Image (cartoon, helix red, strand yellow):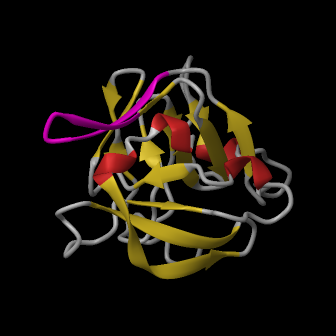
Amino acid sequence: MWEYYGQKRPPFALEPQEGQESVWDYPRPPVVRSFEGLVEVKRKGNIIARSERACRVMETASPPGYYIPPDDTASKWLQPAPGRSFCEWKGEAGYWSLIGESRGKPVGWSYSVPNAGYRMLAGYISFYPARIECYVNGERVRPQPGEFYGGWITGSVVGPFKGEPGTENW
């Protein structure tokens, strides 16, 4: 959790209202928690994923990422995409693209063998809300700023968020 001269949040952090969370109250390294609400991912009216058993990953300064179990993802729409990336906590990630749209950027990623502490994410897929429609409890998610980031912004989280202009050194 962020600490700024004994304060819980830095002075520039927005104050959450009732029913909201501040991303500045999330810990670093990130934590994984189960999420009991409805998470949906859609493309042109087709349901790519739908789950009430998703996980939320929460990390200081970033909106949460939602990871959907493979059984709740329509594999007929997804194919492995080229490329890999590495998270210092979760491990090596592989990417997913939509079948028939492989020329574009990947729409999601997953960790087939996550590091210890993140094993519950094995095979779960998270999606980029900037590249595909994502919903939490019926609310359309806004994408986290910055091309690389995949956080899901809803009305229940406040920032500022990593990836916004001026946050390059966070």
x 50%, y 39%: residue: 158
Position of 88 relative to 56 (above/below): below
Residue drawn at 52 percent across, 71 percent down: 94
User: Which image quadrant is residue 145 in?
Assistant: bottom left
The residue furthest top is 18
Is 168 on the left-hand or right-hand side of 118?
Answer: left
Residue 132 point in image, percent of width and height: 27, 50
Q: Residue furthest bottom?
A: 83
- Residue range corresponding to the magenta coloring: 38-49
Using the image, determine if residue 155 lies above or below residue 117: above
Image side of residue 30 versus residue 19, left or right: right
* Horizontal and vertical percent position of residue 146: 38, 68
Location of the C terminus by quadrant is bottom right
Q: Main secondary structure of the magenta part?
A: strand
Q: Point out residue 55 in the picture as x, y percentages from the top left corner.
A: 63, 38
**Percent position (x, y) of residue 97?**
32, 64
Is any atom of residue 14 visible in this view? no
36 to 152, vertically: above or below: above
Is residue 48 part of the magenta span, yes or no? yes
> In the figure, residue 142 lies in which quadrant?
top left
Identify the residue shown where x is 16% and y is 34%: 45
Res. 126 visible in picture: yes
- Of residues 73 and 162, the one nearer the viewer is 73
Numbered-mark total: 0
Residue at image position (73%, 63%) is 114
Assess whether residue 112 is covered by the magenta stretch.
no
Q: Residue furthest left?
A: 44
